């Protein structure tokens, strides 16, 4: 049988995971600046399977508007170039002797607004995950025997505080990402 501290600990871990996941998702959304995390979602056909780009090449951002992708196996350069071109990131890579250069075009106003909508959608998914963790923990606590109502009430307040803190962290990340995207 679980105890209140165990349930709270489990709940906190689930909420932290939701916030981290949102942070990672935001990282893969393009702003005006080049970031190696931008290509995290790209999958490459290699060795008869589909692999994440990070497993077949290294990605770096030598300039604010340029990413370079260096395949570990030069034979995969065209497959990597094709995967980046076909991703929904709207990028146009060019292969230059084993190094793939990916210029990051400036975003137009409409594209920026679309990206902000995507950020808000991802943030809502994060908030839902945090709420779900709270609800799950609350249900677990209601099932506890041999625990006073006062302890349950106190634990529920603690859960609510955890929930509010994590939601606030997601909201801060949204504000920061939105500012980064809208910055011209």
Image (spheres, rainbow, N blue to C red):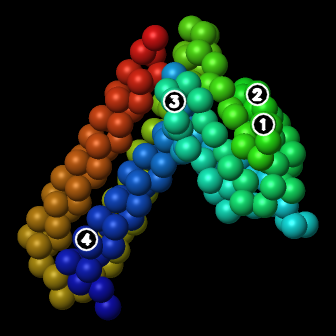
- Left or right of 183? Residue 141 is left
The CA span between labels 2 and 1 is 13 Å
Query: Residue 96 bears which disc, if any?
Result: 1
The CA span between labels 2 and 3 is 16 Å
Give the residue at mark 3.
63
Query: Residue 92 bears which disc, if any?
Result: 2
Q: Residue at x 68, y 62 (%)?
A: 55
Give the percent coordinates (x, y) of residue 142.
29, 73
Q: For the residue labelled by badge 2, is the local secondary structure a helix, a strand or a loop?
A: loop
Nearest to viewer (mark 2 / mark 4): 2
Cβ atoms under marks 4 and 1 closer than 8 Å: no
- Left or right of 23? Residue 66 is right
Question: Which residue ends up furthest to the front in the rendered image?
Answer: 97
Nearest to viewer (mark 3 / mark 4): 3
Q: For the residue labelled by badge 3, is the local secondary structure a helix, a strand or a loop?
A: strand
The disc, 3 or 1, on the residue closer to the chain's N-terminal end is: 3
The CA span between labels 3 and 4 is 44 Å
Give the percent coordinates (x, y) of residue 52.
70, 57
Give the residue at mark 4.
8
Neighbour class for label 1 at 10 Å: few (<14), some, many (≥20)? few
Give the percent coordinates (x, y) of residue 174.
39, 32
Neighbour class for label 3 at 10 Å: few (<14), some, many (≥20)? few
- Left or right of 19? Residue 27 is right
């Amino acid at each position: 049988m679980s105890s209140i501290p165990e349930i709270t600990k489990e709940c906190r871990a689930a909420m932290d995971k939701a916030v981290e996941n949102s942070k990672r998702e935001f990282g893969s959304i393009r702003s005006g600046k080049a970031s190696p995390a931008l290509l995290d979602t790209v999958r490459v056909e290699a060795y008869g399977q589909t692999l994440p780009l990070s497993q077949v090449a290294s990605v770096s951002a030598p300039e604010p508007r340029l990413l370079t992708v260096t395949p570990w196996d030069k034979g995969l350069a065209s497959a990597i170039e094709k995967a980046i071109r076909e991703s929904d990131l709207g990028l146009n890579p060019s292969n230059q002797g084993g190094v793939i250069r990916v210029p990051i075009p400036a975003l137009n106003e409409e594209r920026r607004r679309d990206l902000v909508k995507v950020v808000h959608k991802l943030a809502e998914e994060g908030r839902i995950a945090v709420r779900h963790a709270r609800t799950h923990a609350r249900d677990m606590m209601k099932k506890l025997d041999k625990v006073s109502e006062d302890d349950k009430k106190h634990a529920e307040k603690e859960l609510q505080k955890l929930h509010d803190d994590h939601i606030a962290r997601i909201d801060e990340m949204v504000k920061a990402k939105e500012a980064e995207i809208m910055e011209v």
